[in-house]
Image (cartoon, rainbow, N blue to C red):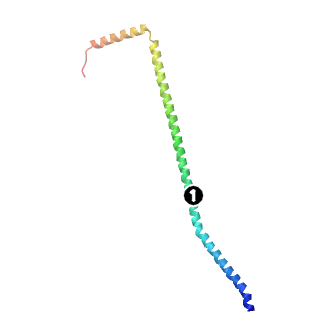
Amino acid sequence: MHESSYHEPINALHNNLDQTLATAQEEISRYTAIQPLIDAKVENINLQLEANYRARLQQVQRGVQHRLKYHLERENTKRRYQQHHMIEWVIDNVVKSITPAQEKENITQCISELKRLSSSPRTLR
């Protein structure tokens, strides 16, 4: 009996160590099985981040394009207004610069030109 009581704690210790090794091996195999899953999740997160980045980049591009179109249209409208104003100013000043004598002379010249054209023979082509 003396010998079995001596081997019993050693055998229990061996069994406990074997069980601990088996558990450790199990945990190692779980870790190796989980690692690809973790890598896949990290890749998925990276893809989501890239998709969000691209969406924001596209949104910024559309905003900048909209602002550029606005400024272009604003400049075109300003240019058209300035041209129209310049034309009106030139016409008004030309009309103001015509004296009554110039107007009478111009009308007389036009009437004489019309008379000359009406008296000339017409040629058919």
Q: Where is residue 5? Give x, y as percent.
A: 73, 88
Q: Where is residue 95? Give x, y as percent.
A: 44, 14
Q: Which residue is the extreme one toward the left?
A: 124
Q: Where is residue 46? Give x, y as percent.
A: 57, 57
State the SS at label 1: helix
Say left or right for 125 vs 94: left
The correct choice, above or below, for 41 with respect to 116 in the image is: below
Say left or right for 26 vs 59: right
Q: How many numbered callouts?
A: 1
In the image, what residue type sits under mark 1? Answer: Ile
Residue density around tag 1, few if under 14, some if 14–19, many if 20 or more, within 10 Å: few
Please state which of residues 72 and 55 is positioned toward the viewer in this rendering.
Answer: 55
Q: Which residue is the extreme one toward the bottom?
A: 1
The correct choice, above or below, for 54 with respect to 120 in the image is: below
Q: Quadrant of the N terminus?
A: bottom right
Q: Quadrant of residue 112?
A: top left
Q: Residue at x 58, y 60 (%)?
A: 42
Q: Which residue is the extreme one toward the front?
A: 1
Please state which of residues 108 and 34 is positioned toward the viewer in this rendering.
Answer: 34
Q: Quadrant of the C terminus?
A: top left
Residue at mark 1: 45
Please state which of residues 27 and 59 is positioned toward the viewer in this rendering.
Answer: 27
Q: Residue at x 63, y 72 (%)?
A: 27
Q: Residue at x 49, y 28 (%)?
A: 79
The correct choice, above or below, for 82 with respect to 19 in the image is: above
Q: Which residue is the extreme one toward the top?
A: 101
Q: Where is residue 111? Give x, y as percent.
A: 33, 10
The correct choice, above or below, for 117 with respect to 46 in the image is: above
Q: Residue at x 48, y 22 (%)?
A: 86
